[in-house]
Image (spheres, helix red, strand yellow):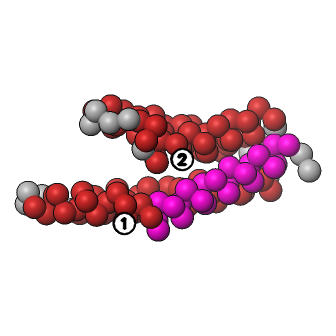
Amino acid sequence: METGVVLYAAASAASLAGCGLHALAGGAMLARPFYRQAAASGVRTQSFRYCWHFVTFSLAMLAAGFAFLATSPDAAPLGIFLTASAAGSSALSIVIARAERALALASPPTLIGAVIAAIGAAALLAA
């Protein structure tokens, strides 16, 4: 099997694992404290819910896109887009962590996005 195909499949698996982690553990570990804090101060929580669902959907689409690339590795523009999306997600997480004066590497979205982007970039270079 070609190295690029294997790496695209690995990026898909990492995206799917990140989606599962976000969907199953992210809400319980990270979102609920925000909901409680927002509710206590009278802030509506729809935006939190929207963001959580959007990130879950985005990770699922990254997994689907990289899986497609594993079967059609010639679609390099899609690989560039998906890799840039994962890198952008990681970068945004770093910006948010800095704004909150928190450690960026302690943030799961930073690491999940960086891992997916790194595998995607390796796949693009190998293809």
Comes first in the chain, label 1 or label 2: 1
Q: Quadrant of the C terminus?
A: top right
Q: Mark 2: which amino acid?
A: Ile
Residue at point 47%, 68% (across, down): 24
Q: Position of residue 39 (x, y in %)?
A: 13, 63
Q: Position of residue 99 (x, y in %)?
A: 28, 33
Can you tell which mark lies on residue 112? 2
Q: CA distance from mark 1 to mark 2?
A: 17 Å
Residue 69 is one of the magenta-drawn residues: no
The residue stretch that appears in magenta: 3-24
Q: Nearer the viewer, residue 21 or 46?
A: 21
By secondary structure, the bulk of the magenta-drawn segment is best described as helix
Q: Secondary structure at mark 1?
A: helix
* Residue 39 in view (yes/no): yes
Can you tell which mark lies on residue 113? none
Instruction: State which quadrant residue 126 falls in.
Output: top right
Residue at numbered disc 1: 28
Instruction: State which quadrant residue 41 falls in.
Output: bottom left
Q: Mark 1: which amino acid?
A: Ala
Which is more foreground, mark 1 or mark 2? 1
Residue 15 is one of the magenta-drawn residues: yes
Using the image, determine if residue 124 lies above or below residue 18: above
Report the side of 89 relative to 49 (left or right). Answer: right
- Outermost residue to the right: 1
Residue at point 52%, 42% (across, down): 111
